[in-house]
Image: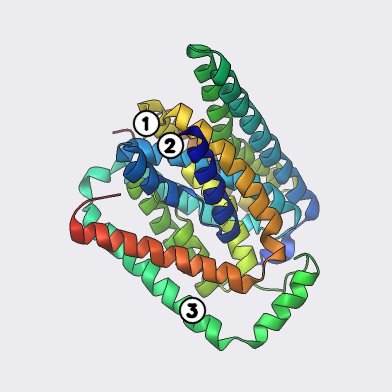
Amino acid sequence: MSAILVVLGFFAGLLGALTGIGGGVLLSPLLVLYFGIPLRQAIGTSLVAVITTSAASSSIHLQRHTTDIRLGMTLELFTSFGAAVTAYLVGYFNRNTLEGLFASFLLYSAVTILARKGKVKVKDQEESAELENDGQTIAPYEPQRYPLGMGASLLAGGLSGLLGIGGGPIKVPVMYLFMNVPLNVATATSNFMIGVTAAASAFVYYRRGDILVHIAATMAVGVFCGSFLGARLAPRIHSKYVVGLLVAVMLYLSGHLFVHLYLGWRP
Amino acid sequence: METLSERREPGFDKAVALVLRIGAFAGFFVMLAGLIDGAFVAGRIPLEIEKFGVLIMLATPVVRVFVAGVLFFREKDWRYGMISLGLLVILLLGSVFGIGEH
């Protein structure tokens, strides 16, 4: 069982580091479905994996200067606050409604990203020129629509606290689609942020004993290696594959949530 | 509002990266040591080592916020210094005082 956990952690870390969503989203349903771990413990345990992905991959993204620390920390304020507040008020929310909203948002973002990607063919050339330079140069940009980004971060943090689904799948599309941030900066900055968002609730789970230490440690060893590889590979992989991967993960998650809502059982 | 992306300094990125790298590597090696120990020794000691590794990992983002905050204040960047401080308060409310426990 340990070997399977290390391998699962490795792929979750790889995917998380490449797309900026943090592997925890994929790990917690797997822990519940295939290892028979209760949801709350599964969430707590995958939070360790999320933090590991964030720390390992951010240290590399930062050295490449693709992380917008100021943008990240501004938005973190809202994700952490959202996570703290909803963790406190968790009993008052209708989780089915939230899961439905979350699934709809993922579906909407996936479709929007696909539609946009079809239109901007010229930009691809600029991006590949950038990639030859090991991702060092970033086309100048200015983050836009801060209030929207902050609101979305509050929502992302809130969902993170309620569902244990890291805010990554919301932050990346919001930064990329609405705030005018380039995709490689959006994924790097999201990777940077998820560690703090996860830490805001991870200590609460730890104090409650909802982090299964042995499973968390076994997975984290795999996650660590996968995240380093993912972050190293990031500039060498063309952004169209990252977009494809991101869209695939978002479609998978929204399908997953819709199925659970429909069938009435949860991950 | 100033452009955030224009104000990115390489040295700053490097210092924050170092904190994350130390935390990630330390947590990784301690957890790995616990797992290897657990393969040979039965009992509580391997689990305690793993627990220590997990705690190092959990503490890493908090230390990162603290270090970034110190750097912002040293640059006299008050706005982002205060943002870091606010972030630290939220994190400490959750971890130390157990706000959000249910």
- Check if mark 1 and mark 2 are on a common chain: yes
**Residue B34, image quadrant:** top right
Q: Secondary structure at mark 3?
A: helix
Residue A45's mark?
2
Q: Position of residue A251 (x, y in %)?
A: 40, 67
Q: How far apart are the alpha carbons under marks 2 and 3? A: 33 Å
Residue visible at 38% across and 58% down in the picture: A155
Pointer 3: residues within 10 angstroms few (<14), some, or many (20+)? few
Q: Does the rendering let one see residue A129?
A: yes
Query: Marks 1 and 3, Cα distance to the nearest angstrom?
Result: 38 Å
Badge 1 amino acid: Asp
Q: Nearer the viewer, residue A64 or A246?
A: A246
Camera-nearest residue between B5 and A23: A23
Mark 1 touches mark 2? (CB < 8 Å) = yes
Element marked by disc 2: helix
Tell me which residue sits at (68%, 35%) in the image: B25
First-in-chain label (2 vs 3): 2
- Pointer 1 or 3: first along the chain: 3
Question: Who is closer to the viewer here, A112 or A68?
Answer: A112
Calculate the distance from the C-alpha at mark 1 to the C-alpha at mark 2.
7 Å
Q: Chain of mark 2?
A: A
Residue at image coords 46%, 27%? A213
In the visual, does A39 lie left or right of A116? Answer: left
Label annotation for residue A114:
3
Residue that label 1 marks:
A210
